[in-house]
Amino acid sequence: MFIDQAKIFVKSGNGGKGMVSFRREKYVPKGGPDGGTGGKGGDVIIRADRQLTTLLDFRYKRIYKAENGENGKSSNKSGRQGADIVIRVPCGTVIKNLDTGKVVADLVNDKDEIIVAKGGKGGRGNAEFATPTNQAPRHAEPGVRGEEHKLDFELKLIADVGLVGYPNAGKSTLISVISAAKPKIADYPFTTLIPNLGIVSHAENKSFVVADMPGLIEGAHEGRGLGIQFLRHIERTRILAYLIDCTDENPKKTYETLVNEIKLFNKEMLKKPQIIIVTKMDLVDTNLKKENSKINFKKGTPVHFISAVANKGVKDLIKEMWKMLKKLDS
């Protein structure tokens, strides 16, 4: 099951108490203070793990607590430090503090990590308070209480190319043809209910990741359809690929509607390179193909006419995507 949002509670460990103790040795009736310092509480660490793809685990466990530090001991022995707790999340997870609303971290790369709650400091034992004028202090510090926070996790998938289009525009069919991904495919709208990732092999040691998003409809940025739930996953893609059904009555208007939904959600996304893919060309005759080829979607934006089912135009499309990605790297 794909889960891309979760809320949890974290608490770091409390620091151990300092010890009040005095030396008790034979023939030393007035031994000095020897109370040790308490151990530091464990930290709460969140670490990105490329092996994970969903926040599903946080549906079943929502409270995470690190270990408390051990109290100080006699003979000037410090208490043991509390064990840290490491919470693993998928790469691309944004962490927000629910109380302040601020973004704590954006863990994009594998093994990126952050301490979200620092363990409390251990209290000093009475040996630390001995002075020439107070050689037998009878007090020690309590440990500092650990931090606690309510956190919100939001997963944004990381892909090179994001497929955007109306429901049933052919996104799932395309990703199933160009990669090993096997999304559900049917001839009715909203077949895709979760984002799907596929690795596309262009040549030996040359590959890139494509994301198939659930279909957008007009008003998606306001919550209509499934768009608002998944629009954020397109934010991390490097290239936006707009898929338009060749049998659409007004392909240009459909394209403009899709662009507008992206703009209303996050206008910065329009700065990404774009490619337009006219799909299902096997369903139309030669004359309609000629009419489609005359449509001026946007000046300077490459347009590809394909049939994923018939595997026509797909190789050239993959070459174009790879070319655009390499240009971004240069």
Image: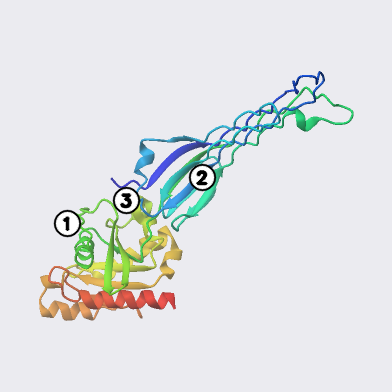
Examine the image and state in which quarter residue 81 appears.
top right
Between 265 and 171, the residue placed more toward the observer is 171
Indicate which label's residue lies in the foreground, 3 or 1: 1
Q: CA distance from mark 2 to mark 3?
A: 37 Å
Indicate which label's residue lies in the foreground, 1 or 2: 2
Residue 185: mark in rendering: 1
- Identify the amino acid type marked 1: Ile
Contact (Cβ within 8 Å) of mark 3 with mark 1: no
Residue 224: mark in rendering: 3
Contact (Cβ within 8 Å) of mark 1 with mark 2: no
Check disc 2 and report the residue beneath it.
Answer: 45
Does label 1 or label 2 sit earlier along the sequence?
A: 2
Where in the figure is residue 192, as x and y percent of width and height?
A: 23, 54
Q: Is residue 261 visible?
A: yes
Residue 55: mark in rendering: none
- Identify the amino acid type marked 3: Arg
